[in-house]
Amino acid sequence: MISLHAVTKLYNEGRPGEVRAVDNVSLEIERDAVTVFKGPSGSGKTTLLSIIGCMARPSAGRVLIDGRLVSGLPERFLTEERRSTFGFVFQRFNLIRGLSLLENVTLPAAPLGEDPREVEARALARLEALGLAGKAAMPVEYLSGGETQRAAIARALINDAPILIADEPTANLDTELTHRFLDIVGALRDEGRTVIMTSHDPRIWQADHVNAVISMQDGRIVGEYA
Amino acid sequence: MTPAFRRQRALADYTLAALARRRGKNIGLVAIYALVVFVVASALLFSSALRHEADTVLAETPELIVQNLVMGRHDMIEGNAIAALAGIRGVTRAKGRLWGYFYDSVNGANYTLMVPLDPERALAPGEAMIGEGVPRARGMFWDTAPLFLSRQPGDLVRFDVVERLSSESALVSTDLILLNEADFRDFFRLPDGVYTDIAVTVRNPREIETIMSKAGRLLPEARFITRDDISRTYQKLFSWREGIMVALAAAALLAFAIFAAEKASGLSAEEAREIGILKAVGWNMTDVIAMKLWEGALISVGAFLIGTLTGYLHVFAFKAGLFAPILKGWSVIYPDFALTPRFDGVQIAALFLITVLPYTAATLVPVWRVAAADPDQVMR
């Protein structure tokens, strides 16, 4: 269970142009389920996702993951939590250009000191499962949109993260690729992983695989649907 | 292989891949950096080699030289002064020296003509030993080519060259012509019994002041030049040349400081974003800093090695070709000599300290600033 208690996030705090991106949000997210945050641009979805994924700290409030308080952890421990618990698929996927697909996928494992052959074998298995095995050596800038998205998913899962966080993962994809993505999400849930996403796309939050939809506006939660 | 070693290897692998991605930019960076190190290394090695050259020259200089002064100017000294000096307690040897200058109107060069003091270099009449610059200036391309000197139109004196002097101390011997004493006196139309000056060797160099004091009473008109005086003159001469090198090195270091300051001022948006991605996928601050340390080390140590090696080759294999014309002297005959290769560990360490460490530190400051922030903040 992921629990947020009165979480607020301010940008430019105490300075001109202060922005209240998330405003006093409290909620609970079930494990082994697919949860989608929906809402217009600027509603605070991505910021909330960053706070849940330990990529940003709340200005106020508490975040607990399986009962562990993570919101006040120092950088080192927060990174450890992020590394062991979360895999991220960013809106623009954020693969590193110039590196091969395999190098990008193994990137999260680089600082762990694992046997490189084991990491590579794991990455190749993950790429094969996502239909990308033949492109492992290809620089990522030559991948198509759908391949790039699957590459980002492979990278997110290389350390076997139990929670996948995806920010607008289908924003740049056509209907067919969106459905293929949803199939992958369903498979991940069936493997026992938790998936938390943001999306503008009704095809996502109306999909059968989704267990909960949380609606946001102006940094607040305005609706929750199971 | 331990996990810590595997971690470092993985970070180094990533760094190499990252450097290869920006190949053009990084090659340019290493080239500029290596150029700065090359200039500073050349300056340091050249200065050091010049000082060594001065030491070599001084090692063969007598402890005391006595010259006669007439109206405050150097004039020939009578031979009977030799016996007077040799009689002073503590003097092991006093010997008259014959040397002078000759302007060669053929090529506008000045030669130093001298009678060797060393009996092993005694020459027969009509023979000469010459410095390596003389045949170069005269176009004497084969070893046994005779040397012709003309004091005035219609007058030509021939010498058979029996040896060319080694280039070990060419900085001072390049324009030297050694002659037999009779030939020297005849060439300059010098009477017997007079000398250019007198070289005095003493038993104990610490007694030089006492000996000078006694000699001064015997030869009140004479000027006494000690080895220390000559050393100071050489030091001034070499210091002036070294000064130019220091100025060059300072300019290079200033360029390097601007370069490092630019580096310290911040990361590009692309670099910052990449750090944000690495942090988001699970790298912590020390992983990012270690990776950037690898990057800085590969660039700075690579440039340091390239710059130092090329500087070493420039000074010792290519005779400091880029600096030599302004540094070796003002004579028509520039010495063409190879400096004795020297490796001074302290100098290399100093060079490392003033080039590699500031760059690495300058690289780390902005990286630390970005790596310490939350990934969400960096990627925004």
Image (tube, helix red, strand yellow):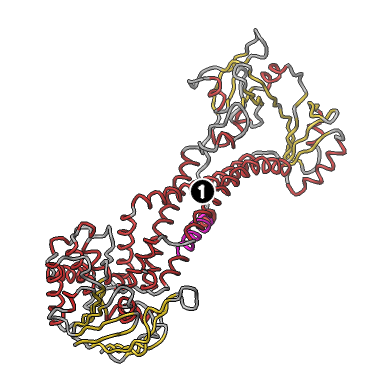
Task: Indicate the quadrant containing the N terminus of chain B: top left, top right, bottom left or bottom right.
Answer: bottom left
Local secondary structure at mark 1: helix
Closer-to-camera residue (B38/B58): B38
Task: Indicate the quadrant containing the C terminus of chain B: top left, top right, bottom left or bottom right.
Answer: bottom left
Closer-to-camera residue (A189/B33): A189
**Quarter of the image where one finds residue B133:** top right
**Quarter of the image where one finds residue A8:** bottom left
Give left or right: position of A120 versus A131: right
Subunit ID for the residue under disc 1: B
Q: Main secondary structure of the magenta part?
A: helix
Mark 1: which amino acid? Ala
Q: Position of residue A138 (x, y in %)?
A: 19, 58
- Identify whether A79 is placed above or below A61: above
Q: Position of residue B281 (x, y in %)?
A: 29, 72
Q: Which residues are magenta?
A: B350-364
**Quarter of the image where one finds residue A35:** bottom left
- Identify whether B266 is placed above or below B175: below
Q: Which residue is mark 1?
A: B41
Asked if one can make out residue B311 in the rendered structure from this viewpoint, the answer is yes
Q: Residue at x 64, y 32 (%)?
A: B118
In the orientation shown, which residue stands out farthest toward the top?
B154
Q: Position of residue A77 (x, y in %)?
A: 36, 82
Closer-to-camera residue (B157/B261): B261
Give left or right: position of A158 versus B272: left
Q: Position of residue A203 (x, y in %)?
A: 16, 74
